[in-house]
């Protein structure tokens, strides 16, 4: 593998971030337009505190009561540990594809493919889930449309089209929309929290006793049981504090990915954890009638309407709709970059098409259209119950992906290099990784043990089986070898051209130094075909140099 460059600039040169892409075996095809805040906004928008609380607060009130909100804090701490481990990878391998790239370069291409497949399944379903929630939970109540599944599906399809057009048009436009959505969401959470705290203090409405109340779940016999009410309330944090690694999928479009991407990954979880807890406390102390609010289908909107008036409810729905849209477009862009990253390594169906980048917009148009088409197929073909089960199953996938990522980190951390100025945990990396692994196993246990999780678990098993069939077909069709990365071949040729001696000069045959990708694994930037191809390149380049030396400098090199 190539050794990590030491620079942090986004300009050209051997120490630039473009050089990182070249050392990974690729060309810089995507346009670098994302600054530090825009990269942070990508991860934060995927989490989307207001959206997450708006969609899951009712479940917490019904299963665990208002006291269940404190489990958000536990989930935030656990997910921060996971984010710290993910950030370690992102700082060292700043390439689109996130965990697919990390596993392919540091473990094995087949393992990397599994990371990519699971992440693709999760992101493709997440786009649909977010946009459908936008239609049914925010937009339709906002404009006064009665609840109707068919209407919600039509609106979802329209939203998918708009998001695809924006994603294709410009990454910069996506970042502007996303940054605005994040700014509005943060402002909404802060203003609402302050307003509710002041209102409770001045008028005496609401009660701080709600913070320790079980509400309508007070007499539930299985409240503390495995898969019971209290455990179910943990799902609010587990289902919402995910997707922070989406910034890593856009690393090749960030100006300073070694710093901005890992900081965005960790910072987004910390910010979402704090703001989410603040928002939940403000909502909970504002409740005057816990049983009535718990029975409401949209308790957040009901609390806003009763305490701040109908106008405040409309403002909330506008902000939530915009936040939903921003989160959906981020997931679509992130998924398209993953498809692009796998396709340029010839590890995705129709890879010759999916790897294409439009030279004018510098965006992967075919990969984006694939996400749009898949959303159309699922939305049209699946009935309501099946679609809901598929969306529920997608909440299990992040725990599997993060757990596997942590195991990978523990297995290869000794081979990871250090880049001056980049994100690094130093001596804390091992205890943090171990704690993160324990937490992820606990989270997975919480997600799969409830009785309601049986069908989603079966769906996840089906996705794994489908991935196994495809990977087996690829393995058999290539006689036990994955197809070599086309970009790797061109990179090797470029390295050989750079190593050619000037006319009349004599190369130093005692060192046989190769200026292309080296075989060290310290940085993780070796293309995903592994050290075997790198060693072949070294031998080929060495023989090529000796041949040129014997023909052009015969006698002088004796």
Image: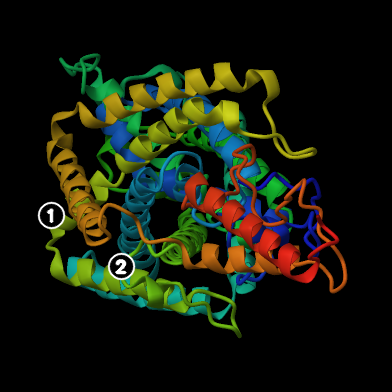
Colour mode of the rendering = rainbow
Image point (23%, 17%), residue name: 223
Q: Nearer the viewer, residue 142 or 63?
A: 63
Q: What is the C-alpha distance between the residues marked 1 and 2?
A: 29 Å
Estimate the x, y position of residue 211 in percent, counting from the top left.
45, 22
Q: Position of residue 316 (x, y in %)?
A: 49, 56
Residue 111 seen: yes
Q: Residues within 10 Å of mark 1 (few under 14, many from 20)?
A: few
Residue 349: mark: 2
Q: Nearer the viewer, residue 154 or 340?
A: 340
Q: According to the image, label 1 marks what residue?
A: 385
Judged left or right of residue 412, residue 267 is right
Q: State which tag comes first along the sequence, 1 or 2.
A: 2
The residue most toward the bottom is 360
Q: Is residue 401 above or below residue 285?
A: below
Q: Image point 58% across, 60% down: which residue?
A: 25
Q: What residue appears at the point 76 percent right and 52 percent down from the top-left corner?
A: 509
Dot 2 falls on a residue whose secondary structure is: loop
Is any part of residue 21 visible from this angle? no
Q: Nearer the viewer, residue 353 or 277?
A: 353
Depth check, mark 1 against mark 2: the one in front is 2
Instruction: Report x, y in % for residue 268.
Output: 59, 42
Kind of element beneath mark 1: helix
Q: Are marks 1 and 2 in contact (CB under 8 Å)?
A: no
């Amino acid at each position: 593998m190539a050794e990590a460059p030491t620079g942090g600039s986004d300009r050209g040169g051997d120490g630039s971030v473009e050089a990182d892409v070249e050392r990974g075996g690729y060309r810089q095809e995507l346009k670098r337009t994302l600054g530090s805040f825009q990269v942070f906004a990508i991860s934060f928008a995927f989490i989307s505190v207001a959206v997450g609380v708006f969609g899951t607060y009712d479940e917490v009130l019904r299963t665990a009561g208002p006291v269940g909100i404190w489990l958000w804090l536990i989930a935030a701490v656990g997910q921060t540990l996971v984010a710290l481990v993910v950030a370690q990878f992102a700082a060292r391998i700043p390439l689109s594809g996130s965990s697919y790239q990390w596993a392919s370069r540091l473990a094995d291409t087949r393992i990397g493919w599994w990371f990519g497949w699971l992440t693709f399944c999760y992101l493709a379903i997440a786009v649909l889930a977010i946009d459908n929630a936008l239609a049914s939970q925010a937009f339709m109540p906002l404009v006064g449309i009665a609840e109707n599944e068919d209407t919600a599906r039509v609106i979802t399809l329209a939203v998918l089209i708009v998001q695809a057009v924006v994603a294709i048009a410009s990454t910069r436009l996506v970042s502007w929309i996303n940054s605005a959505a994040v700014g509005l969401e943060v402002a909404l959470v802060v203003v609402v929290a302050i307003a509710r705290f002041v209102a409770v203090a001045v008028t005496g409405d609401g009660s701080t006793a709600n913070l320790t109340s079980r509400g309508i779940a007070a007499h539930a016999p299985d409240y503390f049981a495995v898969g019971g009410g209290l455990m179910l309330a943990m799902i609010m944090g587990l289902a919402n504090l995910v997707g922070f690694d989406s910034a890593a999928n856009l690393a090749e479009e960030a100006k300073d990915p070694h710093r901005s991407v890992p900081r965005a990954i960790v910072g987004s979880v910390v910010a979402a954890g704090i703001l989410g807890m603040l928002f939940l406390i403000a909502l909970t102390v504002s409740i005057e009638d816990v049983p009535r609010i718990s029975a409401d289908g949209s308790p957040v909107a009901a609390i806003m309407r009763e305490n701040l008036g109908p106008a405040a409810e409309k403002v909330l729905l506008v902000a939530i709709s915009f936040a939903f849209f921003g989160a959906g477009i981020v997931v679509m862009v992130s998924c398209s970059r993953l498809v692009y990253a796998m396709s340029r390594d010839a590890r995705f169906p129709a890879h010759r098409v999916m790897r294409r980048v439009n030279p004018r917009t510098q965006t992967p148009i075919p990969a984006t259209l694939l996400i749009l088409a898949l959303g159309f197929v699922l939305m049209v073909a699946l009935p309501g119950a099946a679609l809901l089960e598929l969306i529920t199953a997608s909440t299990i996938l992040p725990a599997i992906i993060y757990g596997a990522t942590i195991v990978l980190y523990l297995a290869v951390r000794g081979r990871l290099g250090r880049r001056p100025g980049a994100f690094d945990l130093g001596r804390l990396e091992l205890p943090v990784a171990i704690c993160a692994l324990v937490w992820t196993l606990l989270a997975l246990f919480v997600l799969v043990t409830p009785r309601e999780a049986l069908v989603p678990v079966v769906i996840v098993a089906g996705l794994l089986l489908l991935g196994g069939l495809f990977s087996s077909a690829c393995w058999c069709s290539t006689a036990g070898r994955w197809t070599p990365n086309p970009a790797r071949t061109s990179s090797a040729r470029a390295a050989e051209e750079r190593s050619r001696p000037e006319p009349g000069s004599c190369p130093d045959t005692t060192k046989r130094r190769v200026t292309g990708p080296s075989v060290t694994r310290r940085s993780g930037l070796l293309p995903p075909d592994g050290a075997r191809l790198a060693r072949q390149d070294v031998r080929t380049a060495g023989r090529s140099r000796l041949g040129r030396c014997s023909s052009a400098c015969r006698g002088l090199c004796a």
